[in-house]
Image (tube, coloured by chain):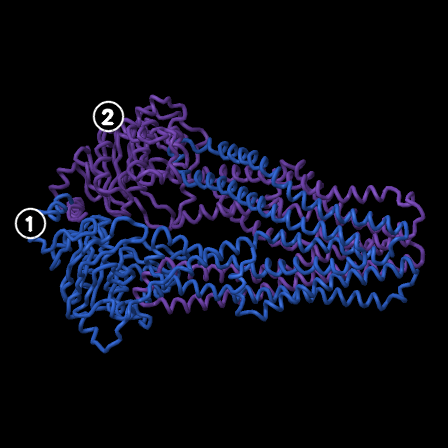
Amino acid sequence: MRTLSRLFSFLFPFWPQVLLSVLLGALTIGSSIALMSTSAWLISTAAIALSVADLGVSVVSTRLFGVSRAVFRYAERLVSHSLTFRILARLRVWFYQAIEPLAPARLVSARSGDLLSRVIADVETLDNLFVRVLAPPMVAVVIVLGMAVFMGRFDFLLGLVITLFLLAVGAGLTAFSLLLNRRLGKQLVETRSILRADLVDSVQGLPDLMAFGQETAWLERIKQSGRVFSAVQTRMAQLNGLQSGLNSLLTGLGVWLMLFFAIPLVSTGKIDGVYLAVIVLGSLASFEAVQNLPQAAQLLEANLQSARRLFEIADQSPAVTDPAEPLPQPASADLRVSQLHFSYEVHLPPVLSDLSFDLPPGKKLAIVGPSGAGKSTIASLLMRFWDAEGIFLDGKDVRAYRQVDVRRMFSLVSQNTYLFNATLRENLLLARPWASQEEIESACQTAQLHRFILSLPHGYETMVGERGLQLSGGERQRVAIARALLKNAPIFIFDEPTANLDAVTERNLVETLQAIIATRSVVWITHRLIGLEAMDEILVLDSGRIVQRGTQAELLAQEGLYRKMWDLQNRALL
Amino acid sequence: MFSRRLLALARSSQLALVLTIVLGFLGGLLTILQAWVLARIITEVFLNGLARDAVLGLLAALLGVVVLKAGAVWGSEVSANVVAQRVKSDLRERLVTHLTALGPAYTQSERTGELALSAVEGVENLESYFSQYLPQLVLAASIPLSVLLLVFPLDPLSGLVFALTAPLVPFFMILIGRSGEALTSRQFETLRHLSAHFYDVLQGLTTLKALNQSRSQAGVIGEVAERYRDVTMQVLRITFLSALALEFLTTISTAIIAVEIGFRLLYRNMEFLPAFFILVLAPDFYLPLRLLGLRFHAGMSGVSAAKRIFEILDLPVRQPPGVVREQYDVRRLITFEEISFQAVSFTYPDRSTPALEDVTFSILPGKTTALVGASGAGKTTIANLLMRFIEPQSGMIQVGTLALSHIPVEFWRTQIGWVPQTPYLFSDTIAANLRLAKPDATESDLLCACERAGLLDFIQSLPEGLQTQIGERGARLSGGQAQRLALARAFLKDAPFLLLDEPTSSLDPALEAALQASVQQLMQGRTVLVIAHRLATVYQADQIVVLDSGKVVEKGTHEELRVANGFYARLIRNA
């Protein structure tokens, strides 16, 4: 219920459109009822009338209702679709604003990719909330009330019967369908996903299956999971068929009862005979309003589940917040890390233990170590994606500053540079929205990207594709470097900037980076021991602890992890 | 829309299909009967002044019709489902069998792999075609026709209105179908763009934060959505017009008929009973046609899914060459005799340059042969040929004195321990993933293999051990763990010939040493072909085959090749 009322709150700002849409929906079905009622009255009256005058306005109104339904429907669809787009925009903006403070700390897990695609699917599910879920019952309520009054004016009993049967279909069958869905729906989803996984495996894992001679056994497995799924689907179809049958039965029965009770009223003269046909055909037409409510209810279930998941994500408290009374922006880029301990969650083992280093302006520090040693966590902590005790900027704890002021001090080039599906210029401008063309070009020249960009047919207006995949890995990293240069923060952080690049590209990129950092503070995080001779200090990290520190020459002179990594690196072939 | 080939699929469930059609048609006839009885009752009461007791028989008949009709609706849905289920499982099995016959060369190719996947997943789309669209198509064809046959003798003029407007319904329906398709695809496109943008921003959120630009994006998201609303609404205003026309057509013709028969009643040119009967029937006349329009899309997606499936089923399967089933002691041949490539060439479909050209070399029994070359040099193609995922287009591969193509492929594969760089992880338990290599392996076999592959510590650290779910719906294994799983499979299989795609080295000294030890142990006492990525491996190989652009450029031991100072020597120096 709470979820539902929160969902309704998304509609609230648009109440005039909601009202209009429901009104038009009711008028659409109302037109059908009116068309059948006036037609019935027209024919009945004509059968006993003596002159055209007796037909009154019924001829005109029959024609009118014949036209109005289509017009109302058209208007209703326009209004409701426009409304859907508004809700959709509001939903996305709301969700974005809710999770922006959470990123990335609360959004990364072992399967963060899944989380995001899940979120997208859930938001998309909610797109049809109004048109297909909330509007039909609201329209139905209007029609049921209207029919109760319409038929009740002939006789109280008739009003009662039509109301009961409309409710029986609209509420009773809907409840039945929900109940059925709750029980079987889950099974259906589960068995379908097992079958789907088996099928996907049979295609993508075919080499492995064939290599082990298991292709026939796997086909048997698919047959088996197909049978299980099919059995659930069959039970579902039987119950759905039952629901359709009941729908037809209740409609027929309702109309039959209306007839049954109306006949004596005609015989006794309480109702004029011409209205008998009106009562029957009008009632028959009114069932259109409740016919699709069971489907709407099933969708509501899906919508509520999606909404619950979204609210659950959005309701988390952020890992990093700004202090109530922040210090002014740090005056110098004097960075000091002292006895830093960190673990992602309380019960997890520490990722970093007792880490200390100084980075006065202009110093070049490298942090190396095997994967999983905790190197990237340091970058995340410096950027304040997570918070920990022991990081000081300009002599003060970073948590005393506003987040934006801390991030202003760092230009980050990470291994998974994200490029947006937009033009190169737009991607670059993100780093400094007000940058001039000269500034952009100069950054790209330094990043050795400018000439490549000019060689493209659309130059700086080239679209980089989804996740920048139209560019090569090396080009993407150069865009990231150009961004970092545009941002022009006093401290550069390189977090494995050459990961996933081939050897030649890696070497070129390292050369570019070294030219850039000559005059800046740098934290260079890497597991590739290339270009580290230029570093003032190298920290060797293993399982979150510093096991060695010194310059490259010093470290190579010692027996230790650094030497081992160095040897290993030079033993690889290609 | 009405694909003969699709219908042929339902042949195995003909009875259920006939039942679906018969029950659907029966439901239609009962609708007409219901209208007739209703008209009778109202005539008797309204015009002839009969009391309820006098029409009780008719009322009972009406009730019977209502109940029967509900039964027909239920029955036809249930039997339509039977058809759909049977068609789907038949097709699923045929498709998977066919894909297996086409082999990894088809399913793993970047271009066709997607097709295969979407075809397999598209089988479900046939559900709605058979359970919704097809029955509705039958109704849409039969009910209006029956109504026309009844109405014409009763009142030719109304019959004419029906007959003239009915063909317009499918006409508008097709128009709606087309523009509707454009509409749904446009709407779909719009939503896809919106979602893609939203997804893009969410994925890049960390980057935006690093650039201090994350807060301003909320406004951008709103603007993008608003822009799409404007564009889409302009299109919708026009596309909804054809739906308006259809809606208009069916209601206005009901109105026209009502007025037309009303006037003839007034001038006593017509009886009340047939007049009222026709009026009751009018909405039912158009309803099946309109419902067909609603289900048109479900039908179309079924047809297009079927098209993709048939395209794959129509691909010819390469006939396995004549297999000699003579009683060779093939095992002896493989273990103790050499496997030789003789002028083998292979070009992948849709490629202009050959992946392998005139390749000749031998894999010596009991020895280790290393394949060396840049990516794209043809190393993987050689492995695929040995696995017989593909066959040479010219030249031949010999095992001892026997052509490889003459050895039964199932038997041949039992002789190879295959260790790919990244094994495929099936959505199942670790145990099931291991048992692929040896279905009857006991739990202790599995643990033993894991120990030798260096995977045991990891497995013991999992709360559910070997029963832990992995793959798409379970835990993710790291690259190193997946490689070990592949090694464990090879230990389990214990085949005499080992085909090893060596993992590219990581830079964790501890892990690296452990992995090396496992690989060494696996290679013990076997004939090995290794695609090498480490210097240590080529040092120890008995023979190195150097490939460049699909050709063998050098052969020999590490020492020989180093001294020769050719392609290999240059390769080593660059490393």
Q: Which chain is blue?
A: B
> Quarter-wise, where is residue A234 in the image?
bottom right
Task: Answer whether residue B171 is visible to the viewer in this image.
Answer: yes
For this rendering, which residue is in front, A226 or A482? A226
Q: Are the numbered discs 2 and 1 placed on the same chain, yes or no?
A: no
Relative side of A397 to A147, left or right: left
**Within-10-Å neighbours for mark 2: few <14, some 14–19, many 20+:** few
> Residue B232: horizontal and vertical position, in percent?
56, 37
Relative side of A135 to B282, left or right: left
For this rendering, which residue is in front, B163 or A103? B163
Query: In the rendered structure, the residue with mark 1 lies on which chain?
Result: B
Instruction: Identify whether B217 is placed above or below B180.
Output: above
> Quarter-wise, where is residue B392 in the image?
bottom left
Q: Which residue is mark 2?
A: A519
> Quarter-wise, where is residue A268 in the image?
bottom right
**Between marks 2 and 1, how big is the CA–CA gap?**
47 Å
- Name the residue: 77% across, 62% down: B34
- Name the residue: 16% across, 57% down: B370
> Residue B64: horizontal and vertical position, in percent?
77, 68
Identity of the amino acid at label 2?
Thr
> Residue B51: horizontal and vertical position, in percent?
91, 63
Q: Which residue is mark 1?
A: B564
